[in-house]
Amino acid sequence: MQSLMYISIIFGSAICWFVILYAVFVTKPTAENEHLEVRIAPVFKPNPIISEVNCSAYLNEESSEALAYTPIPLIDPPDLSMKCEDIHGRQTFVNETYPREADFPIGFVRIVYKDYLFQESELATNFNKNNTYCYVLDSSASSKFQYQIRQLAKCFPQLIVPERTFDMKSNGSNVALAQLECLKLMMDRQWRYVMFLENYDIMIKTNQELIKILELFGGVDDSGAFHDVPPQVATAFENSKNKVLAISQGTISRLTIDRIFHTMQFVKALNSTVRELESEFLINVLTNNTLLDIDTYNGKKCIDRTSATKFVKWNYGQECPSQRFHNHVCILTLIDLLSLKSAYDFTAHKVEPSYDYGAIGCWHEYMFNKQHVIGNHYVNYTFYDHLPALRWRRLQAIGRTTKFGC
């Protein structure tokens, strides 16, 4: 009998400890009440072609498995269902809002023209219900791709797709008009910064990390258009009449965009003299601001210095594991993921699903879990605090911007 009593006490103690540990590690208090609420972490849904890939091993600094990795291509299937329930069946779109996110919505303008499943997964991985996403279509996109993007937008009120398409060239022609079309449609939405992305860009900072960094920016724009561009590319770029690469590397504040639209009525002017103003808009507004006459950071002075918006590997003096290039830019593959983990940039350019979706899928899983499961959003504020734009802002606060130097 005494033995049974001891067993009962031990068993009861074990149950108590289990309840305590469960409450500490699995539940969390809510802001609305004092009781503890169980949170079931969302689950990332990988594309079936990479369901057997050991992504965690490839993202481990101490693992050598990435050296033996073979790229896994992905081609969109011809019979992909575009019903909303099937889109949600393929991806996990999390509707949960985390601390800080409700008060700091972000806008995203992305030029798209190809690889629908990649676009769908990239959106799902970084989706936040408080943000606004505008996808502007290149007229070169197939009718099927255009249909898919427009159907995707019908499933999410956060997603905007302009009716108009744009004939965008590799030299940047019409990029400004396309992105401004998105901005016009976004002006009645709430967002504090807008990021400009290209078709094959991927986010490498979570939404929570972005907010922490942009709070530090405090309204300052990040528009280092030519950061890390090799001299060979920069020279050709400077000689070009279409210097429109600049906007695709920008993270611009709502204040700047509002002044473009409302103070200068710039869109009306741009549409009337497109060829003359397109280049001026991108260089002056985003890196110089002479057209707006705003007392703000003059990025053109520091055009060759550090910015934070985009990670790019050029084919001049930088290792490219894939040995694949497009317009002098290295196509990122799985071996590059470790570099992205430690990068300070907001986005990376560029990936290629038809060459290696394995790298993309593994990165999406990593980003999804970091945002929704692991919750590690450490930010090295020192790096960002030393960016030219933020140093300029500190001088502005004390009326000493004339002392600014890159």
Image (tube, grey):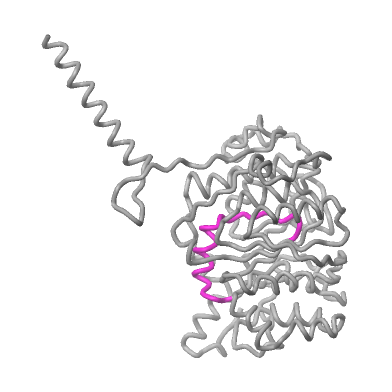
Residue 17 on image: x %, y %: 26, 31
Q: Residue furthest left?
A: 2
240 left or right of 156? right
From what the image shows, is residue 168 above or below residue 254? Answer: above
250 and 393: which is toward the camera: 250
Please give the name of the residue rendered at 80% of the width and 53% of the height, measured from the top-left corner: 147
3 left or right of 193? left
Q: Answer whether residue 308 is visible to the viewer in this image.
A: yes
Residue 290 on image: x %, y %: 70, 88
Please give the name of the residue rendered at 82% of the width and 58% of the height, measured from the top-left corner: 328
Tell me the quadrant of the picture where the N terminus can be found: top left
Tell me the quadrant of the picture where the C terminus can be found: bottom right
Please give the name of the residue rendered at 58% of the width and 59% of the height, measured from the top-left corner: 344
The image quarter containing residue 193 is bottom right
Q: Residue furthest top?
A: 1
The image quarter containing residue 288 is bottom right
Residue 352 on image: x %, y %: 78, 48
- Span highlighted in magenta in the image: 198-220
Residue 321 on image: x %, y %: 75, 45
From what the image shows, is residue 268 above or below residue 121? Answer: below
Q: Answer whether residue 335 is visible to the viewer in this image.
A: no
Is 111 within the magenta? no
From what the image shows, is residue 238 above or below residue 134? Answer: below
220 left or right of 333? left
Is 208 within the magenta? yes
